[in-house]
Amino acid sequence: MNSALNTGNTAWVLTSAALVLLMIPGLAFFYGGMVRTKSVLNMLMMVMGSLFVVGILWVAFGYSMSFGDSYGNNGLLGNIGQYDWLTSLMANDPKASLPAMAFVAFQAMFACITVGLIAGAIADRTKFGAWMVFSAIWAVLVYFPVAHWVFDLNPTTGGFLAKWGVIDFAGGTAVHINAGAAGLALAIVIGRRVGWKKNPMKPHNLTLVMIGAGLLWFGWFGFNAGSEAAADNSASVVFVNTFVATCAAGLGWLATEKLRDGHATSLGAASGIVAGLVAITPSCSAVNPQGAIIIGLLAGVVCALAVGLKYKLGFDDSLDVVGVHLVGGIMGTLLIGFLATKAAPAGVDGLFYGGGLSQLGKQAAGAGIVLVYSFVIATLIGLVIKYTRGFRVSTDDEVLGVDLSLHAETAYEFNESGGGGHFAGVGHAARSHMEEE
């Protein structure tokens, strides 16, 4: 029997999966550069640690929960046992144009990076073990169900938001609003950092931040264009829209900084890159390049202003997960209702193209449902962990630095000696503290 396998599409999806995987260390570098010197290793560990645990859960039953047939075809949750451990998907299907395991691999990276995004909201003060527990529970209770709602496009057994006609090409709701709402919840549950608003908490390595942003931009082409699951015209349109929206967002953020503060900063440039990528993620298949530029420009301006909300509202979102991912995700999702055009691959007209308010209503419903669900469940998980095993390190450990207190390491070793024992490079106070533990 001749195989229907399309090797070009297969190669593109597998390459895109690798690109999205590269985004995860890129995110770790981006976040790691933004924290203080005493917290950088812990930040890297939180992002990479969530990758480890979610990757195993995805293979065990996460893919099945996300893309299995929904129970009763209600679109709420995929059959948890349908593809458990993926054994039924290993055999080659001669009728399939894309191997099932290629799609499994691609979507696995989405699950892993979504959980990692949350870590930036609670930097500098979180127990690593508690974070790993949260990562596992949140992935199971929130990400896997929401991925089913949004990404399972089967008209009969797929997710209810997809059936409603909510457009989210690559994860404005399932990834960014989802993670941003959870980050806000945890920032509130865990509380503010010691000295927040009083002590300067500037990024310790802006070069690392820019490297991380560059890796994220590079990998995001797999994130967005790879979501077409084919090497075709639609993927090409998505690729260009992703590129120009990000350029526009960078300009928008820098212009906002210049007008507000008198300086255009490298941190602003890196943050603008991420804001543009976030906003174009749900909309990249629904708009033309002009619309993508408008979305990117608005995201750069609005997100640059939104990051200051934490000071006015009093929640300590350490690395602006709320201002960039939650706000940017909402913007990109809602702007589809205005700027979508049938000329784009999604084939839907928004309000500005004569499509009325119908699509905007769908987009608002999708964004609102995911935001509320993620915020509520993340709050409950956070409270349970807080009042059982504890979610936050002690004040002494926070002041000392979570790198030393949790991992017995420092990111930068300036002593001439090195390579000693387990405590090499650790100061006397920290060493005594750990020995007591």
Image: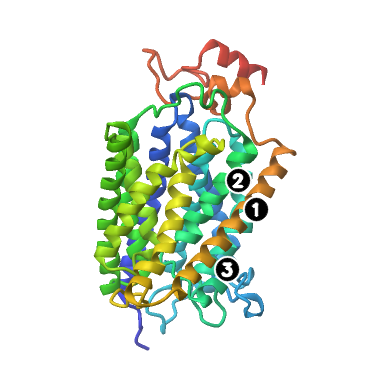
Report the amino acid beneath label 1: Val
Residue 335 x %, y %: 39, 63
Residue 394 x %, y %: 64, 25
Q: Nearer the viewer, mark 3 or mark 1?
A: 1
Q: Residue at x 47, y 66 (%)?
A: 104
Residue 189 x %, y %: 64, 40
Position of 96 relative to 385 (above/below) = below
Work out whether mark 3 precedes mark 1 in sequence or the reverse, and give the earlier one: 3
Secondary element type, mark 1 = helix
Secondary element type, mark 3 = helix
Position of 428 relative to 8 (above/below) = above
Per the rendering, the mark at residue 185 is 2
Q: Is residue 403 left or right of residue 354?
A: right
Q: Residue at x 28, y 71 (%)?
A: 231
Report the amino acid beneath label 2: Ala
Quarter placement of the N terminus: bottom left
Contact between marks 1 and 2 (CB within 8 A): the answer is yes
* Number of on-image labels: 3
Contact between marks 2 and 3 (CB within 8 A): the answer is no
Residue 232 in sight here: no
Badge 3, how many Cα within 10 Å: few under 14, some, many 20+? many
Q: Is residue 247 left or right of residue 359?
A: left
Report the amino acid beneath label 3: Ser
Task: Identify the residue under disc 1.
Answer: 376
Residue 429 or residue 183, whichever sits in front: 183
Work out whether mark 1 precedes mark 2 in sequence or the reverse, and give the earlier one: 2
Secondary element type, mark 2 = helix
Task: Identify the residue under disc 3.
Answer: 64
Q: Residue at x 74, y 38 (%)?
A: 387
